[in-house]
Image (cartoon, rainbow, N blue to C red):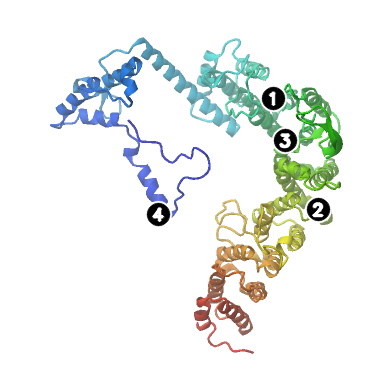
Amino acid sequence: MQEETRGIDLLGLGLQPRLHGDRAAAKAYLDSRQCRKREIRQLAMRFATADSDLREQFAALLARFPDDLPYTTEGQRADERAKDYLRENARRWAELGDIGNYGRIEVEGEPAGIAFRSPTPRTEQEERQVEANAAYFEESGVIGWATRCLQAGTIVGGVSLGDAIRVAKDRDYVGMFDERRDPEHQSPQTVVSAVAAAALLSEDLSTSDREWAWMVMARVEVMQEPADAWPGSRIPWHPASHLVAALAGDRRAVIPRADSVARLLRLTLHPLEEDVAQKAFAALLADPEPHVKWVTGRLAVALSILPRPYWRLDGAEPDSSAARERAVSEAIDGLSVPALPWPELPVPWKKEARPRRYAGDWDEEQWADPDPYFDAAAAGKLLPMFPVESWCRCSAHMPLLQEGLNRLVAWTAAKLLPDWEAAPGDDTAHRAATFLIEWNHGLGSLLSRTAPFLEVGVVRKLLNPFAVDNEDSFSVLAEFVEDAVVRHVIDAPTVPNGTLTLLEYCTDRVLRHPAFRRGGYRAGELYGWSLPKVVRALLFVPLDEKAPGSVRFANGDWSELSIAMPVVSKVVTELGWSRDVMDWFLQLCERADTAYPIEPFADQVLPVVASANDRWSGTTIPARIAATVQRLADANFPIDAALARRLLVILDALVELGDRRSVALERSPTFREIREA
């Protein structure tokens, strides 16, 4: 019937073959061939109209299709519905072989063609299906056009605005937006809401059409969700997401409507969290007015302070709707009030007696979340949207932001490292940390984005609580380092003042990590998630070699590598004996190729190779160091005698480790004439 589906990663795990170079080009060529785009029915039409002796035999074979149905299971032979379906298809296919069913068609300005015309009239059911298909394709085209308009923020080509409005109005009816429909029946809802939202982007929209579009948006705003709707459902075509886009577009207008911000604030309470509530937050946090952004940031924190969930036999959960609605009302009132501080956070831990799950008595007192508590997992989804750069540039918001960061840091540190001593076997704090993974990442990135606007001492004070020997809290520092390296060094046109000082501070913390205590258990092995991440970042290899958005240290441009040398030298000279650290350092050298400065390389590697002992045995590290020495020596030939002696000491140490390449390299013209001083 058709080519089987290829190249689709159904599970999203990246398990499809990943080809490169000539093999990728060959696969692309094979996939682009016409035989991959045709069905056998198309080839049958060509064969039936070809001038060939086989045409009559071909037609006779197709004519026998209804008498020899293609059963795939024995059960189909006794199933009348299945037999009718197969027989109808076979009858349709048999008609393809009769040349009498083909005719010439003329199109003005085009070459004449041949078209197939079935001699059998369509049944009533087929007519309905044809009409449904035509309506579906028309709706899909209009939805696609409206989606492109909303993404571009302006009217785009492909469908005229008048035609789109006509299609939408033809499908609009009273009660359409009373409740969201199931996926198979939602297309008209999506057409009407998407076109109405896109139409509002046009400055030339007539008054009647504009009134109709805003009336549609008002109906979408009060639309109810089905009783069985799940808050985590992903519905990108949801009409309420079009409402968010329309209100966000109105906020960019010369004279926006007075109630657009309030309506967006109310949409943050929408039951559909991913595709409506978070889109409303994103629109508000990107609003042109700084005060609206600040009020939204306060609301994000306030909505994360919720009644604590608790277990009950009837399965009931505490109702947080009243508290959430109150927070939104306060945010709307705050639009007319000067900048206010972020809400106070509940204490991270509270000691109380908790009921047993399967008994009626009470356990002894234990540490648990307070009531209400701060839901950091929910707030962590919004932290990346916070426009901290805009707040930092505002004199009214900057001190309030710094105060808010102090609160968030203090709460996180107390949550991850409580000041109470846990009983033996009590992992309450560690179990709580598993719910803070996304929050820790967001907080580390938030501190990195804010760092260029704060004094170095202030940032170090914010980072101090996480510079401890604890994997959970260390994740905040790791995210800070990686974000700072990528955002402020690799991607930034100009490296902000204090960035390298902060990276050196983080380097000093990494040097004290228990994994690098020589003689310790599994010394030098980088375990966990945070430690490898921070070491890779400090060696400036946190991304792939090709990074289109990078300003430096990628895409073949390593001219400013000297910026990174103080941090890289400290990491390599102190920790290079670890095979993981040396492996990542050599990745940096190999990516930089001949642009890596040869003198710093000698100073970095020389103290390490002498103490490597057998830690590198069974690895390619000695051979890779020798290859780097040869590459840099050839690129900088002739080299200074003193530098050549230091490189020879490195090669001698590699020979002791059993690297044969180093023996040959010592006898090369670069080092042959070098004598001991």
* In this view, 667 is above or below 568: below
In this orientation, does residue 344 appear? no
| Mark 2 secondary-structure assignment | helix
Q: Where is residue 649 in the image (x, y as percent from the top left)?
A: 61, 81
Q: Where is residue 561 in the image (x, y as percent from the top left)?
A: 64, 64
Instruction: Name the amino acid type tagged 4.
Output: Asp
Residue 22: assigned label: 4
* In this view, 48 is above or below 591: above
User: Viewer-nearest of labels 3 and 2?
Assistant: 3
Q: What quarter of the picture does the N terminus occupy?
A: top left
Q: Mark 3 points at which residue?
A: 378
Q: Name the residue under label 1.
A: 270
Mark closest to the chain's N terminus, 2 or 1: 1
Looking at this view, is 137 or 207 the one in front?
Answer: 137
User: Viewer-nearest of labels 3 and 1?
Assistant: 3
* In this view, 295 is above or below 223: below
| Mark 3 secondary-structure assignment | helix
Q: How far apart are marks 4 and 3 (CA)?
A: 46 Å
Tell me the residue at 56%/30% (across/down). Answer: 149
Mark closest to the chain's N terminus, 1 or 4: 4
Q: Mark 2 points at which residue?
A: 459
